[in-house]
Image (spheres, grey):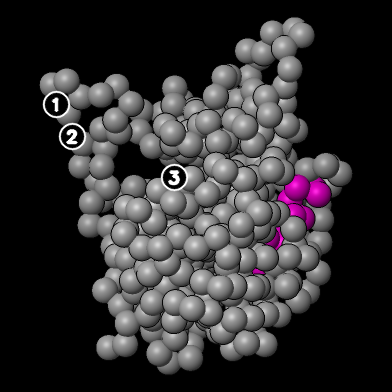
């Protein structure tokens, strides 16, 4: 089977995307590239990844794409640069694997959809739809065991901290700078939506529950109502973005959907968080815990911050790339393509608008 050479276009946010690509034997990373105009901290992170994989780091995206014989671009930059790098890769004829969120602007998503379709390349938004519990939920629904689904809800709370708790800033102290905080927090994994522009958890993490809802129902969203707040973390308060949100969805075929998403802090949960899928059907219901199957590991001298519960039988990275390779081989669509990514971005944009206005917002047909 043909192997694909991959260019990693910025690896400063989530290097697990690039590592996940290499989980499949048909994909190999051969070069890291970014724009020379990026600041030093960007070049340092890119160089560190390149050194680990013993591949070149080129401070010129177009030159790297032209000179290294690559066919796939892996994009994991700041959120506001995702789409620009993806458009440039598509225009160079490369297939694209992109980190979430697709963008913080719907207009940027439109640029990606246009470039991907015009250049006839494949696009995969990184997601968790091949986790065992999600696959099982899809199988149960497809079997008809619960009849025709009519309502779906997803809890997506993850127990990570984001710096000082809400209310900890003393009078006269300056507000926390978003980008500076995210850069510093990267060392211990407590960084969130890396970028110059602050992004709340609905925009940052909402792709996962919304992708589950899309995967399990196949229905488009018509209208949304949302509430958002900064409930836990001072960095979110200071930058005017949410760390907790609820969204209600009116969907095609009379389906109702809802989700709760938030970064609830390490003190809020004994494990990585509460992530569950609830589906009501005409003949029954199901509740799926996203973490299953898992084992609990306890031992003497265990670090305080180490997660005790560990997921097992997870082939999500491999299966995503298997799906991506199949799409390239057969000229079919990926499990979360550019139009699906754009649709999810449109939902989050409408939800944030709804939260500001305090009333439902309709999504335009597209």
Q: Secondary structure at mark 2?
A: loop
Distance Cα–Cα, label 2 vs label 1:
7 Å
Q: Is residue 197 visible?
A: yes
Where, quadrant-wise, is the N terminus in this rendering?
bottom left
Inspect the magenta stretch and tell me whether residue 347 lies in it. yes
Distance Cα–Cα, label 3 vs label 2:
20 Å
Q: Residues within 10 Å of mark 2 (few under 14, many from 20)?
A: few
Q: Position of residue 109 (x, y in %)?
A: 70, 67
Observer-nearest of 33 and 296: 33
For disc 1, the marked residue is 299
For disc 3, the marked residue is 275
Q: Specify the label residue 297 is tagged with.
A: 2
Q: Quadrant of residue 251?
A: bottom right
Inspect the magenta stretch and tell me whether residue 365 lies in it. no
Distance Cα–Cα, label 3 vs label 1:
25 Å
Residue 16 in the image: above or below residue 139: above
Q: Secondary structure at mark 3?
A: strand
Q: Position of residue 83 (x, y in %)?
A: 65, 65
Observer-nearest of 246 and 189: 189
Q: Secondary structure at mark 1?
A: loop
Could you tell me if the residues under marks 2 and 1 are in contact, i.e. CB atoms within 8 Å?
Answer: yes
Q: Position of residue 321 (x, y in %)?
A: 37, 72
Q: Earlier in the sequence, mark 3 or mark 2?
A: 3
Magenta span of residues: 340-354
Observer-nearest of 58 and 224: 58
In the drawing, does residue 32 fall left or right of residue 299? right
Could you tell me if the residues under marks 3 and 2 are in contact, i.e. CB atoms within 8 Å?
Answer: no
Question: Seen from this angle, which residue lies furthest bottom?
Answer: 330
In the drawing, does residue 184 fall left or right of residue 49? right
For the point 59% across and 88% down, which residue is it?
Answer: 120
């Amino acid at each position: 089977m043909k192997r694909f050479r991959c260019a990693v276009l910025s690896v400063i946010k989530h290097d697990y995307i690039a590592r996940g690509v290499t989980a499949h034997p048909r994909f190999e990373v051969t070069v890291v590239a970014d724009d020379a105009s990026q600041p030093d901290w960007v070049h340092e992170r890119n160089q560190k990844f390149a050194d680990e994989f013993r591949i070149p780091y080129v401070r010129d995206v177009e030159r790297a794409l032209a000179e290294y014989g690559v066919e796939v671009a892996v994009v994991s930059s700041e959120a506001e640069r995702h789409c620009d790098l993806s458009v440039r890769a598509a225009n160079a004829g490369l297939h694209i694997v992109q980190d979430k969120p697709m963008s913080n602007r719907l207009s940027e998503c439109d640029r990606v959809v246009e470039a991907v379709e015009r250049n006839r390349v494949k696009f995969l938004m990184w997601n968790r739809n091949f986790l065992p519990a999600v696959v099982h939920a899809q199988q149960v629904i497809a079997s008809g065991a619960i009849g025709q689904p009519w309502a779906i809800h997803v809890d997506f709370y993850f127990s990570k901290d984001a710096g000082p708790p809400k209310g900890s800033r003393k009078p006269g102290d300056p507000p926390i700078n978003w980008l500076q905080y995210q850069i510093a927090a990267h060392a211990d994994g407590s960084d969130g939506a890396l970028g110059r522009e602050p992004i709340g958890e609905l925009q940052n993490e909402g792709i996962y529950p919304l992708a589950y809802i899309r995967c399990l129902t196949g229905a488009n969203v018509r209208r949304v109502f949302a509430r958002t707040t900064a409930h836990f973390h001072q960095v979110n308060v200071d930058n005017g973005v949410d760390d907790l949100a609820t969204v209600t969805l009116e969907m095609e075929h009379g389906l109702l959907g809802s989700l709760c998403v938030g970064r609830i802090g390490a003190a809020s949960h004994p494990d990585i968080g509460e992530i569950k899928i609830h589906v009501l059907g005409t003949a029954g219901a199901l509740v799926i815990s996203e973490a299953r199957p898992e084992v609990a590991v306890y031992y003497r001298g265990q670090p305080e911050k180490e997660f005790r519960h560990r997921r097992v039988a997870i082939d999500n990275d491999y299966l995503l790339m298997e799906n991506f390779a199949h799409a390239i081989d057969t000229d079919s669509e990926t499990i979360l393509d550019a139009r699906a990514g754009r649709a999810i971005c449109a939902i989050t944009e409408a939800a944030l608008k709804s939260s500001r206005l305090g009333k439902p917002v309709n999504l335009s047909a597209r």
